[in-house]
Image (cartoon, helix red, strand yellow):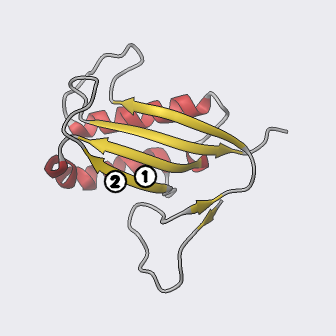
Amino acid sequence: MNVLQPPGWAPPVGYANGICVPAGEIAFVAGQVGWNDQQEFESEDLIPQFEQALKNVLTVLSQAGGRPEHICRMTAYCCDKSAYLEARPELGKIWRELMGKHFPAMSMIFVADLLDHPAKIELEATAVVPPRI
């Protein structure tokens, strides 16, 4: 996996401008919210929902043999910009615990609401899983 960083550009913080990967199996992970495996929210707070949503993405990806470092692109949809900005240090800690120092191409989109109440954040991902030998 190669990070696409144009010469002279300031490095992005917490994401990559682009990723280029060799051929493999492409896995598309649908938007995951912060509920448990029984589709029950254990918290209405952003931080635990983010952690659970990211765990859910990784659990779905594992069904294709994928790992965090195989994620090429992630999109986050969040209902509360000020809460997100305030929580960034804690969210970064959770990210590093689950994803390590892997930062895919990412987009953060702030929305008025999400389908599954009381979801505060939804994460979707695209990964390229290396061919199995």
**Marks 2 and 1 close (CB-CB < 8 Å):** yes
The extreme bottom residue here reads 8
Q: Position of residue 75 (x, y in %)?
A: 41, 46
| Residue type beneath disc 2 | Gly
The quarter of the picture where residue 24 lies is: top right
Query: 112 or 51: which is nearer to us?
Result: 112
Q: Residue at x 26, y 54 (%)?
A: 88
Above or below, comparing residue 44 to residue 92 in the picture = above
Q: Residue at x 26, y 31 (%)?
A: 114
The quarter of the picture where residue 51 lies is: top left
Residue identifier under label 1: 96
What kind of element bears circle 2? helix
Query: 125 or 97: which is nearer to us?
Result: 125
Q: Is residue 14 left or right of residue 84?
A: right
What kind of element bears circle 1? helix
Quadrant including the N terminus: bottom right
Q: Position of residue 67 (x, y in %)?
A: 60, 41
Above or below, comparing residue 20 to residue 81 in the picture = below
